[in-house]
Amino acid sequence: MLNLQYLRANPDEAVKLLAKKHFDSKKLIDEVISMDIMRRSTQAELDLLLSQSNKISKEIGQLFAQGKQEDAAEKRKESVRLRDDARMLENKLKSYEDKMYQLLVLLPNVPHDSVPDGKTPEDNVTVRAGGSMPSLPEHAKSHWELAAQYDIIDFEIGNKVTGSGFPFYKGKGAKLQRALISFFLDHAIAKGYVEYQPPLLVNGETAFATGQLPDKDGQMYFVSDDKYYLIPTAEVPVTNVYRDVMLKEEQLPVKMTAYSQCFRREAGSYGKDVRGLNRLHQFDKVEIVRIDHPDRSYDVLEEMVIHVEELINKLELPYRILKLCGGDMSFASALTYDFEVFCAAQKKWLEVSSVSNFETFQSNRMKLRFKDRDGKIQLAHTLNGSALALPRIVASLLENNQAADGIKMPSALIPYTGWNKID
């Protein structure tokens, strides 16, 4: 959630920056500021009235002490009237605060100055690329054909048991999943991240705090009887570990990692882009989350990008890193880098990670603050990244490493799989 003080001081700047996200915010920001003016005016009126009420209460005590009962009774009537007026102002104040809050949560995060202009993924800017393009055998197969050939992923059983987008992994396919999860977690732990195993269901307050609600309400699975949401990423429960927490500066940075299954409705997805593992409703992912000082969060963002890049290099996959344009960014992000790997049989780039800095957007919602060494209270910056999402990594490993005698594994994974080839 955007900071009210920032909007109050920089309304024109906010409108200009949000236009980068192709969000027309002027009317909304004007309404927020107007509501804030009425709220502050009402608060001042209430403060004055309460001051008068306190003064009269003291006068009543003095009048009783002096034996002036009638004068005290008159003052008491005035005190009752002031209390009634105060209750009316308190109700009015709460109404302004509620309306202002409802408007504030509709505003996305402002993008960082370095975010490129643009509206669609085609406008994203390639920062760098790496890895070598594979040379595939003639008549190379897609990963879903390879999965059927080697009997490692069954999409039909998943469709029967649940529905489209819920595959069954089996044999070496299931072992490959476990191997990748352990590989990703071990790499994060070696970098100083503390491992968590979070719940897969969260309440509405938790989903709101990280920006999933109200923005992505329709994309989340909802358990109506219990009013719980299935998580779309481990970012949601893990970041909320520090909701309503006051940290000390010396406790920063907070570094957390978690494996979880993720659930996304992916409403409106169809066609060739959802074949096989390209787009699932349930998938596995390892997440890294940072809570850090505002002065160093953009250095931390670059560090997290390097972390993900190292993983992809160790998996020997061709990749590119994109800086997302304003129109392709998420509601809550201030700056996002996407990683894509090349899936050679499909001849297409597939996104496997997003690494984002949210600045104070999430921490303002969740009241995540820290006290600096001078005793000043500040909002922390939050960051997270996929390190990594499994489905498209698996798709690329299968397609890019296929040969006549099987599918070879990158050397970094062999200690985790226990074998060097799927055959």
Image (cartoon, rainbow, N blue to C red):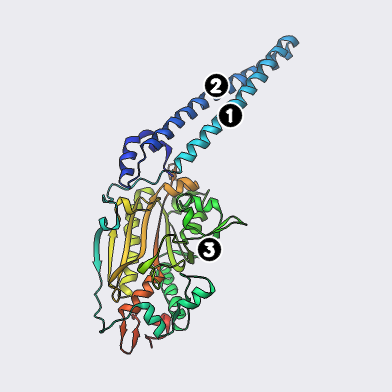
Identify the residue under disc 2. Answer: 48
Which residue type does callout 2 highlight? Leu
- Numbered circle sitting on residue 156: none
Q: Quadrant of residue 8?
A: top left
Give the image location of residue 328, x and y in percent.
33, 54
Whether residue 246 is visible to the viewer of this picture, yes or no, is: yes
Q: Regarding mark 3 in the picture, which secondary structure is present there? A: loop
Does 187 sit above or below residue 335?
below
Which is more N-terminal, label 3 or label 2? Answer: 2
Give the image location of residue 101, x and y in percent.
49, 39
Give the image location of residue 178, x and y in percent.
46, 76
Which residue is at 34% across, 39% downward? 14
Q: Quadrant of the C terminus?
A: bottom left
Q: Which of the two discs, 2 and 1, sits closer to the camera?
A: 1
Which is more N-terminal, label 1 or label 3? Answer: 1
Residue nearest the viewer, comparing 380 with 121: 121
- Numbered circle sitting on residue 90: 1
Which is more N-terminal, label 1 or label 2? Answer: 2
- Numbered circle sitting on residue 198: 3
Q: Residues within 10 Å of mark 3 (few under 14, many from 20)?
A: some
Which residue is at 35% across, 79% downward? 398
Give the image location of residue 157, x and y in percent.
50, 78
Q: Quadrant of residue 176?
A: bottom left
Point out the residue furthest to the front here. 271
Query: Is 143 left, or right, of 212 in this rendering?
Result: left
